[in-house]
């Protein structure tokens, strides 16, 4: 027997042990603190660093797993930070199964079942969002999906793969995700090529300012490439005027990419808010946000696979398919920047089959409603001020019952809220003001949980002021 061989009986014992432990954890999860109490970098360093074992510990290697869970940020029903899904358990089992299978889901011949499942899931998602017929692939997350989309846009409007980058401009709102500027840098266009378009009083890109920016670039000899419309900005959840942007893309011959990493899946519950999204050339979305999947599964949808192949197809002889069959010869690496890629689709396939799409639609609708409940509770509290409309499930507000520097005060309140461990909030800048932000994309959250936000902020404010 080789040194890394594990007898089936030993694996079964470890798997049962892990299954029981994680089931117990999920059972007590709603009552756990929203953040590990008193945690520090020094503490985690003492717990989880040490010398590399030269000889194995055997099953004792699992003995410290409870400490890993104890000092992790739990997927609590009162976690309202960032835009991060809640890790639905059926999908977690899918991750376990995918790890056991250990497929390279890059081509049908290397993962026949896995690649077929991924293409099926992509079709399901596209149809559910009103984009039937779109192709795509599952990615690490929204940032990689946006990068791939803008690479496709560049190759379609200002080809650079063969001769190198010759410039070009991108357009997005001042509220767009930071991954857009990162993508511009990685694609060789540079940060200066990104035109940040002003927003209206609802934090949506202004179509008149967008038109003017495109006109200025054309007059100065620039090459406009793409407009990135946000379907749910990170800070406020605002949705850009998708139909007006699509009209401008048609008029000027530009690529339309919709960054829907946060919000696009809300179209399952409120489709009218996303009219025009199906006119995009490409669309990013994150199942590990609003389909509640464990982290590591984003998605890029695109209208024409030829655009993806133009950007990414570059196959060496050792990877070339030996068949032209449209199923057996299919390779994701011809339409993606990844070669080796994990089987991301299995967890999503199992989750959708287990619950059905309607259950996800209902859960998203509940999240949207809970955000309105929280907004109303904030509006009813005279010591708090809401700073943005609630288009989706992000609620931005601050404590104002003080003559102190409100930015500094709210920073201190946020730190204290985290330390108290009853709810977890994040922050944003809204119109230059430091803002407390609660974002609800959690299938475990209840109305009592969101109402706790107000009482916790007021309690933290009292402690900070004292």
Image (spheres, rainbow, N blue to C red):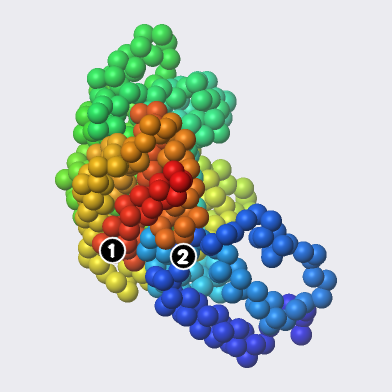
Residue at the disc numbered 1: 448
Q: Position of residue 424 (x, y in %)?
A: 43, 55
Is residue 216 visible in this depiction of the protein? yes
Give the vertical position of 62 relative to 428 (above or below): below
Q: Which numbered marker is on residue 57?
A: none
Helix or strand or loop: what does disc 2 sit on?
Answer: loop
Instruction: Give the residue at x 62% y 50%.
Output: 317
State which tag comes first along the sequence, 1 or 2.
2
Q: Nearer the viewer, residue 329 or 452?
A: 452
List x then y, in percent, for residue 10: 65, 87
The residue sitting at the right extreme is 54
Residue placed furthest toward the top: 219
Image coordinates of residue 301 in percent, x first then y, are 36, 48
Q: Which residue is mark 2?
A: 33
Q: Is residue 423 left or right of residue 133?
A: right
In the figure, is residue 180 to the left or right of 77? right
């Amino acid at each position: 027997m080789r040194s890394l061989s594990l007898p089936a009986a030993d694996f079964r014992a470890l798997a049962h042990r892990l299954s029981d432990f994680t089931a117990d954890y999920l059972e007590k999860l709603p009552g756990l603190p929203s953040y590990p109490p008193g945690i520090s970098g020094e503490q985690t360093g003492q717990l989880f660093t040490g010398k590399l074992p030269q000889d194995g510990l055997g099953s004792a290697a699992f003995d410290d797993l409870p400490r890993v869970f104890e000092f992790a940020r739990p997927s609590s029903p009162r976690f309202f930070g960032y835009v991060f899904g809640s890790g639905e358990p059926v999908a977690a089992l899918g991750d376990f199964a995918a790890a056991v299978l250990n497929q390279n889901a890059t081509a049908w011949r290397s993962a026949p079942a896995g690649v077929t499942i991924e293409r099926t899931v992509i079709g399901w998602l596209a149809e559910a969002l009103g984009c039937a017929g779109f192709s795509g692939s599952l990615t690490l997350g929204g940032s990689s999906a946006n990068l791939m989309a803008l690479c496709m846009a560049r190759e379609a409007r200002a080809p650079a793969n063969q001769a190198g980058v010759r410039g070009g401009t991108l357009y997005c709102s001042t509220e767009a995700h930071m991954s857009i500027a990162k993508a511009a840098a990685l694609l060789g266009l540079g940060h200066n090529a990104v035109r940040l378009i002003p927003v209206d009083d609802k934090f949506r890109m202004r179509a008149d300012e967008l038109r003017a920016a495109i006109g200025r670039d054309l007059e100065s000899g620039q090459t406009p490439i793409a407009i990135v419309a946000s379907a749910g900005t990170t800070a406020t959840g605002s949705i850009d005027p998708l139909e007006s942007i699509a009209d401008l893309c048609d008029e000027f011959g530009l690529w339309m990419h919709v960054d829907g990493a946060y919000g696009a899946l809300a179209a399952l519950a409120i489709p009218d808010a996303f009219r025009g999204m199906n006119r995009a050339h490409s669309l990013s979305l994150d199942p590990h946000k609003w389909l509640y999947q464990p982290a590591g599964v984003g998605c890029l949808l695109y209208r024409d696979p030829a655009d993806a192949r133009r950007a990414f197809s570059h196959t060496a002889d050792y990877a070339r398919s030996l068949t032209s069959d449209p199923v057996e010869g299919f390779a994701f690496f011809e339409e993606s920047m990844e070669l080796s890629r994990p089987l991301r689709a299995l967890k999503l396939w199992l989750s959708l089959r287990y619950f059905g799409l309607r259950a996800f639609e209902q859960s998203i609708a509940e999240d949207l409603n809970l955000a309105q409940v929280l907004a109303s509770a904030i509006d009813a509290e005279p010591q708090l001020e809401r700073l943005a409309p609630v288009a989706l499930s992000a609620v931005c507000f601050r404590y104002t019952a003080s003559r102190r520097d409100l930015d500094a005060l709210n920073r201190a309140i946020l730190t204290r809220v985290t330390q108290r461990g009853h709810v977890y909030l994040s922050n944003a800048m809204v119109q230059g003001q430091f803002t407390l932000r609660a974002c609800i994309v959690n299938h475990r959250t209840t109305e009592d949980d969101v109402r706790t936000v107000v009482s916790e902020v007021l309690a933290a404010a009292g402690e900070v002021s004292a």
